Image (tube, rainbow, N blue to C red):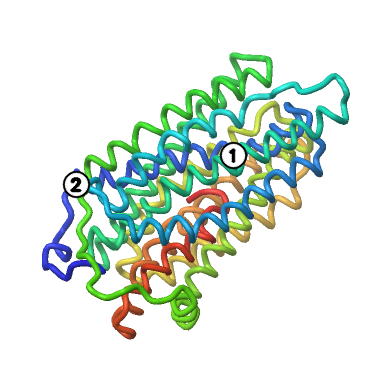
């Protein structure tokens, strides 16, 4: 449980907020490249059958859902001189970077097309599972730092604003790299390999900034942990917690499905040479609106802000169905509208999460965070963190 020391209610320093925010830059970079590019890379560059390519993504997500609660519980129970969160981030950063980079390699197993297809399938499944394991080892303990840095309601919103500013900033950087490299290099296989290699380096370095720039502040539990079954029961009786999970899951499931299809839509239907520009517009608008929504939420509440943002996003999504080839300006306008809505999906659920967990601790007297954070993380990786 968090130490109820008054220091946790004080304002956080700018350096702490910057360091914490930097910790999500790697997740933003890797998730952006994967959600927009991995499926089309597997089908159009690696040459994998579309059905097998979709299965690669499916198996990766299933493995992710399995390892999330396991690593979450292990993180809660870790005792280390580096801290229970920081130690996972430090040691998980290497496999996180390594297996992300290996996802953009196209190995050759056989001149026999059928054998090579299954060889590619096995390779990308294995790399996908290992990458998700490394991602969880870094990102899940990182997300658990939020309620351990401050108990102040508005400071949590501010903290998450910095977090997603870095996350979206990292994704913008990724998309800019995509635009530049796709214009300079004609070979698609080399394009993705170079982008993947650069993004690997850029993803790992901010993790160390976060570890060295933040301080874990919690008190060791004086009581034994509840049995796993009891923890699950408590979590599923916390209705506000379930609402927040539902909000995040539905929002980002919709986003991931759209983001995976957009590259095909933009290049095949809209006849554009690259899909990176469209994704870039969404992210630039999202980062501009992020701090605007954060400020507005203090006046009208987080729920109203979320409803406003989602309404614009729904309109933008619906508008894509009516686009015709050549309507590029309208495509960019709808992308900007979507970015306004996407920014609320970043900010609001994450700023609400620590509040509903603390509410449960208040009503039950138990540190339900021990299971809530791992359970929440099962829904978190639907595209971007």
Which residue is drawn at the image coordinates 69% and 39% (left, top)?
39
Q: Left or right: where does residue 130 sit relative to residue 21?
A: right
The residue most toward the bottom is: 363
Q: Camera-side residue: 141 or 15?
A: 141
Q: Residue at x 18, y 67 (%)?
A: 3
> Few, some or many C-alpha atoms within 10 Å of disc 2 (few <14, some 14-19, many ≥20)?
few
Query: Which dot marks residue 316?
Result: none
**Residue at screen point 81% across, 32% down:** 117
Q: Do callouts 1 and 2 mark residues in contact (Cβ within 8 Å)?
A: no
For residue 227, which quarter of the picture?
bottom left
* Position in image of residue 225 (x %, y %): 35, 73
Q: Does residue 142 sit above or below 92 in this rendering?
A: below
Which quadrant holds residue 304? Answer: bottom left
Q: Position of residue 176 (x, y in %)?
A: 50, 28
In this rendering, the label closer to the viewer, 1 or 2: 1
Q: Position of residue 221 (x, y in %)?
A: 25, 69
The residue at which mark 2 appears reads as 14
Q: Quadrant of the N terminus?
A: bottom left
Residue 197 versus residue 10: which sits nearer the camera? 197
The disc at residue 34 is 1
Q: Which badge, 1 or 2, is on the more N-terminal residue?
A: 2
Q: Measure the C-alpha gap from mark 1 to mark 2.
A: 31 Å
Q: Residue at x 34, y 38 (%)?
A: 207
């Amino acid at each position: 449980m968090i130490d109820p020391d008054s220091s946790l209610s004080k304002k956080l320093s700018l350096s702490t907020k910057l360091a914490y925010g930097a910790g999500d830059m790697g997740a933003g970079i890797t998730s952006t490249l994967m959600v927009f590019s991995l499926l089309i890379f597997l089908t159009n560059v690696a040459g994998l059958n579309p059905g097998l390519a979709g299965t690669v993504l499916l198996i990766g997500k299933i493995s992710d859902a399995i390892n999330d609660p396991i690593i979450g519980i292990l993180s809660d129970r870790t005792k280390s001189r580096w801290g229970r969160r920081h130690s996972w981030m430090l040691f998980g950063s290497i496999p996180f970077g390594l297996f992300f980079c290996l996802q953009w390699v196209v190995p050759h197993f056989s001149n026999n097309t059928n054998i090579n297809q299954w060889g590619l399938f096995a390779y990308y499944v294995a790399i996908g599972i290992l990458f998700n394991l490394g991602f969880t080892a870094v990102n899940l303990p990182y997300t658990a730092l939020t309620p351990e840095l401050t108990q102040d309601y508005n400071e949590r919103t501010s903290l998450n604003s910095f977090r997603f500013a870095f996350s979206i900033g990292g994704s913008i950087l990724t998309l800019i790299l995509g635009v530049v490299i796709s214009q300079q290099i004609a070979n698609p296989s080399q394009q993705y390999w170079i982008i993947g290699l650069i993004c690997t380096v850029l993803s790992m370095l901010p993790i160390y900034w976060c570890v060295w720039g933040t301080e874990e502040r919690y008190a060791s539990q004086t009581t034994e942990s509840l049995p796993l079954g009891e923890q699950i029961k408590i979590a599923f009786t916390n209705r506000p917690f379930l609402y927040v999970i539902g909000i995040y899951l539905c929002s980002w499931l919709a986003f991931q499905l759209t983001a995976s299809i957009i590259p095909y839509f933009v290049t095949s239907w809209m006849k554009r040479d690259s899909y990176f520009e469209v994704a870039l517009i969404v992210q630039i608008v999202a980062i501009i609106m992020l701090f605007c929504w954060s400020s507005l939420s203090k006046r009208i509440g987080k729920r109203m802000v979320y409803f406003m943002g989602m309404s614009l996003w729904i309109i933008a999504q619906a508008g894509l169905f009516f686009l015709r080839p050549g309507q590029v300006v309208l495509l960019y306008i709808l992308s900007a509208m979507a970015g306004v809505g996407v920014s609320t999906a970043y900010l609001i659920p994450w700023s609400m999460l620590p509040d509903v967990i603390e509410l449960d601790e208040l009503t039950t007297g138990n540190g339900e965070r021990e299971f809530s954070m791992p359970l929440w993380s099962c829904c978190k990786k639907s595209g971007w963190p």
